[in-house]
Image (tube, rainbow, N blue to C red):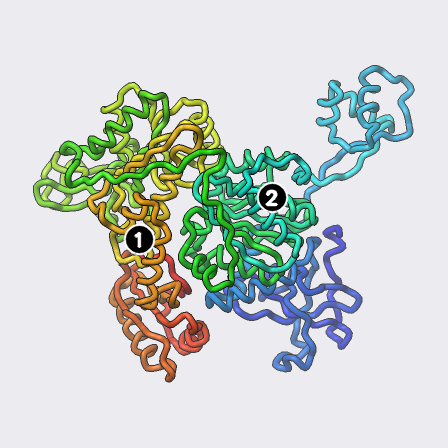
Amino acid sequence: MAESDATLTPPETGDDAARIAVLLPLGLDIAYDYLVPAGECAPEGAFVRVPLGSREVTGVVWRTVEDDDDASLARDRLKHISAVLPVPALPESMRKLVDWVAEYTLAKRGAVLRMVMSVPAALEPAKMRLAYLADENLPKRLTPARKRVLDLLADNLPRGAMDLAREAGVSAGVVRELAKNGALRQVSLPAWQAPERPDWRLPRATLSTDQRTTADSLVARIRETRFSVTLLDGVTGSGKTEVYFEAVAAALEAERQVLVMLPEISLSTQWLERFRARFGTTPAVWHSELGQRERRETWRAVSTGDVRVVVGARSALWLPLAELGLIVVDEEHDNAFKQEDGVIYHARDMAVIRARLAAFPLVLSSATPSLETLGNVRSGRYQILNLPDRHGGAQLPHIETVDMRTAPPPRGAWISPPLREAIAESFAAGQQAVLFLNRRGYAPLTLCRVCGHRLECPNCSAWLVAHRFSDTLNCHHCGYRRRPPEACPECETEGRMAACGPGVERVAEEAAALFPEIRSEIITSDTIGGPGEAAEFISRIEKREIDLLIGTQIIAKGHHFPLLTLVGVIDADLGLAGGDLRAAERTYQLLHQVAGRAGRARHPGRVLLQTYMPEHPVMAALATGGRAAFLAREAEAREQHGQPPAGRLAAIILSGRNEASVAATARTLARIARGDLPTDGGIEILGPAPAAMALLRGRYRYRLLIKCARAVLPQPWLRRWLATLDVPSRVTLRVDVDPYSFL
């Protein structure tokens, strides 16, 4: 439909004008009624432009309305829609997903819809470009150059002028003259060409017997064309990706679209290469680093079905894939799938809901599944397939702990003698190594050696992190940055500010002093700016241009380097501090994943964990391979305390510029909540208390925690309670159902 066709004539407001409810991508929970002129069509799911006050906005037809459904607004008071936009309608399953997510997370429906309509420009008519086809009017003089152009167009495929000139090896003037003389006719084509479709018929990789059996099971689920959730639980290096590629191929064979969600799309280079090797082309990619043009055209191509496979971060969940037949959530345990801003949701869990609403299979893949997912397996809601061995005969790395109490590094150093020796052995064998520390920068704390003053962020409850390479002190929460002071701001003593503790830059400095001949590189979110830089970095590792990687958790995710045989963890205890109920589980997952980078090919791998608590259950489980026992113990502890997945939590976060106002509001809300608890019990109010990160981006924060049994849904009570509250305008209230962060 052309743009002019989409604009409607203002209708009469008679009985023959259809009445529809339109949901707008605003912070609203209700759909507004509008009229559609007689003879025009605005079906459910259509994108429409409607007047709202003095402006026009774009929304989605949510449902048709009968006059007796809502008599609160008479027909003669309704406005008419302005246009129906020339894009495919939003599928019914997506509209149901918006409603479901809003209901579950207590978000406004319009705010959820805004995530679906994240690229407004994609709703406008597609830009067109001129192209040429051969006409019947042959030129009077057929020069060799002209003949090459006409011969090229004999396949009846239109081409742009520059493409024609380049492919035929002629100047652009030759093409223009042929068009002027009537030998070529102009046609209009979309400015953006649809990507090549993946070919599921191409030969698959050689699979082991276990892989083949597992892949066949997944393919059978695809062919059943009904909702199911399958956990693909395989050790690092077991070839889980190649296995679920077979499910992708089965979905493509059935002419269905596929969505693959990765936690770190900017580091997907090796994954994309494997996809191209299997399917002959790369899929569409969706992440925050895309330019506006790429986002616009990808969104449109997804909605029209021209794109068959999308790989993306959590925001890809909201793409309008009308023919979706499979979702794969890779590294399903990863915290990056939890959205903490705006609408707060967990993309893995909402992917399950999307699959259920549209009745198709979903695959969760991980070497370290979350307790929530394993709990669903035990209850029978999810199925499980196991890959217990590494592919191609590779062995799992040998993991050992280094007790820092008995084998400490020299004063002022961070690499213990056993780890130094292991690194030297690795380099002597011509192999690569990783030093892992989940802490960016040079040092996490800078203090005055005279008075003890510590440099803090003025906007957050956080120490400023020293970055030696940029010579700055940074806050990793709000982005505040300053130069290191010459004198202490408190006692004004000069030259006595000292960096305390290690970050990856400090470890890199120490490694360079110990091994001056080796080539090392730091990899963190500070040094990898996007997919292009990640691809270049990975290429250098594969070409043996880097011997030692020093990095944060970014190196734990999915990389395969055949000559990387040693992983040294500088501070294995780092994630165990604080009051996070998932601290042990997360630490185990992270260390297991980073350990899995070692020994993935023919060379055996070795992992050294530097720890002051070698007897801790996490360290013991990693060193002995006792995953099952560790997870069982962790699940039992959660059950005893009624914590997820055995129980449910919802957090109420209050924030504002005035601490006293936020604290008073929090106390008032807690008092009201306790006076309005259900009479049958089942819901407990904890707090209020200052958040662990009590000051964040200049706003003071208090938290209440709603706790209830697994069988109790807190949303109905929360919704009723929140509807009665009168929160001051200077205080912001946010609800986090199923919180993952307790900062």
Please tell me which residue is depicted at 33% across the width and 56% down the height of the picture: 582
Please tell me which residue is depicted at 42% across the width and 56% down the height of the picture: 341
Please tell me which residue is depicted at 56% across the width and 38% down the height of the picture: 207
The residue lying furthest to the bottom in this view is 679
The residue lying furthest to the front in this view is 209
Label 1 to label 2: alpha-carbon separation: 34 Å
Q: Position of residue 595 (x, y in %)?
A: 36, 39
Vertical side of 599 occupied by 638: above or below: below
Q: Is residue 171 visible?
A: yes
Q: Position of residue 368 (x, y in %)?
A: 41, 49
**Mark 1 residue type:** Ala
Determine crowd level at label 2: few under 14, some 14-19, many 20+ residues with C-alpha closer than 10 A: many
Q: Position of residue 660 (x, y in %)?
A: 25, 67
- Disc on the earlier residue, 1 or 2: 2
Please tell me which residue is depicted at 49% across the width and 55% down the height of the picture: 348
Q: Quadrant of residue 492?
A: top left
Q: Nearer the viewer, residue 403 or 570?
A: 403
The residue lying furthest to the left in this view is 450
Q: Secondary structure at mark 2?
A: helix
The image quadrant where one finds the C terminus is: bottom left
Q: Quadrant of residue 279?
A: top right
Vertical side of 126 occupied by 519: above or below: above
Vertical side of 153 occupied by 350: above or below: below
Q: Nearer the viewer, residue 20 or 466?
A: 466
**Mark 2 residue type:** Glu
Q: Position of residue 199 (x, y in %)?
A: 67, 38
Q: Nearer the viewer, residue 192 or 679?
A: 679
Q: Which residue is mark 2?
A: 246
Q: Secondary structure at mark 1?
A: helix
Q: Which residue is mark 1?
A: 584
